[in-house]
Amino acid sequence: MKELDMLVVGAGFAGIYQLYKAREAGLRVKVLEMGDGVGGTWFWNRYPGARCDVESLDYSYSFSRELEEEWEWSERYATQAEILRYINHVVDRFSLRPDIELNTKVVKAHFDEKANVWEVQTEAGEVYRARYLVMATGGLSVPQRPSLEGLDSFKGRWHHSARWPNEGVDFSGRKVVLIGTGSSGVQMVPVIAEQASHLTVLQRTANFSVPAHNVPFTPQALKAAKARYPERRAMGREAITGQFLNANTKTAAEMTEQEQMAELEYRWRGAGGGFRMLRTFADQMSNPETNRLVAEFARKKIHEIVKDPRKASILTPKDDLPFGGKRLSVDSNYYETFNKPHVDIVDVGAEPLVCATETGIRTTKQDIDCDDIVFATGFDALTGALKAIDLRGEGGLTIKEKWEQGPVSYLGLFISGFPNLFVVAGPGSPSVLSNMVHSIETHVDWIMRLLKHAQQHGVQRIGATQEAEDAWVQRCADEAAKTLYPKAKSWYMGDNIDGKPRLFMPFVAGVPLYRRIIEEVASNNYQGLQMS
């Protein structure tokens, strides 16, 4: 049995930064990671075309000016491979690797109420005891496994985007069926189409995708960007998503029709695309009329790009989907790829999947022969990783019981009934609606200040009150209700998992407000927390 001050689960961006800060504070700390490498989502998601949809200059640590200066990003939107190299560089630069235990899957974590410690067991039977347990397990880390009837009978190869083989997959000259058109599917389509003899995309629900306008960094551009890094970070901290996206402060109604169209074109083309499209108008995610204006603009763009009317119709989101209600995809030549004669798309909303066969996929209307099936079917977002562990708090309360009606938390950091446990960028925080690295640093820094306070006052148990948790859950729901997000069926709401309670999981009111709230909690003697 190993005795620690802190045990961290997960060696992605969150776990690595938590390790760095805990060691800096002199704590005995270990990180347990089930993979055979660090990187979290960037270790597992190595599918073709995988890259971040947040610009690399922002999707990076800000705690070290020297690190910012020395690391050379090659592209505006970094690939999975480059981000993984960056994370490994950080781990080695700050000598963190000795305190990271790979190939170590946590299966059980129970709170010992008498000793005020967490007892954690791994799949291999190792036991750790730690005062504090930090769940740095990531919001998108548990893939939704394929449940396609007959898959075992399929004679070809099949792969899931989140568990891609290390050696890669060669699709040259092969017929491929790709299931799913979320961000992973959107990124894979153009790359697989370059190799495959034929690619058929199966789509359940069309979502909006916007052009990334990705470009390589020139040495001059990178030097100029680094010179302004402190300013860029400061602007990001005051931006609703934790990254500066040049948001328009005017509502659509405050602009003429000509100005509206100019702004939309500017953001689709001139401003560099990506998530800037979510900031076209100040009331875009709260005013249905404004959102409809943006959605209709994007629909017209799809029909302008995709030449085949049938394909364009399938790829165009329906009128009831708010623009941005489901997470936007950020693409490079996604829609353009469907102009290639060997690339097709099937609407499985109108033509449902039936099963896999020995030679491919069967829908209610046709058999599609293929050599490979690729699943881009997403994740059990925000809750899957915690519920996959036998996690028990006070009185033996399990996390599955606690979250039976959906994930609840206080500040997205604490779960009432689970003392001395912290969730980094979990449900009830800006998390997936923000620049995750910024939100991770915000959470970890705050946790460490809390633990310093606890040490100074001889505190051994820290937990959220039920009243504080109830109030925060209601606050999150009230903020979400002011927006159009709950109007969409999305993984933000848990809609992608059968039987999962429908609840808008992130805190939607933005990074600056969230930061002010948690700072106020700290200044009010950590209001909402019981310390003993």
Image: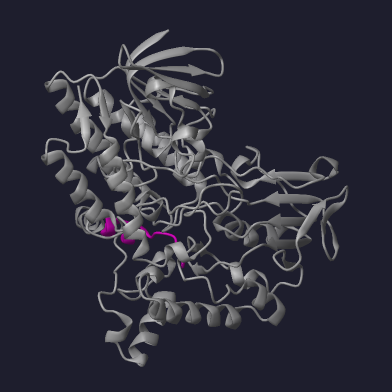
Q: Is residue 32 above or below residue 265?
A: above
Q: Is residue 248 above or below residue 372?
A: below
Spot occupied by residue 485 in the image (x, y as percentages of width and height): 43, 63
* Total number of numbered discs in the rendering: 0
Q: Residue furthest top?
A: 1
Is residue 325 highlighted in magenta? no
Q: Please state which of residues 154 and 267 is positioned toward the viewer in this rendering.
A: 154
Judged from this view, the residue extending furthest toward the right is 358
Residue at figure coordinates x 52%, y 58% from the top left: 490
Q: Tell me where residue 134 appears, x and y as whole percent.
A: 36, 29
Q: Is residue 215 magenta?
A: yes
Snapshot quadrant of residue 449: top left
Q: Residue at x 18, y 50 (%)?
A: 516
Residue in the picture at 33% in, 48% down: 473
Q: Which residues are magenta?
A: 212-225
Whether residue 174 sits left or right of residue 295 in the image: it is right
Percent coordinates x, y for residue 211 in the rendering: 49, 69
Question: Is residue 381 left or right of 303 when viewed as pictured?
Answer: left
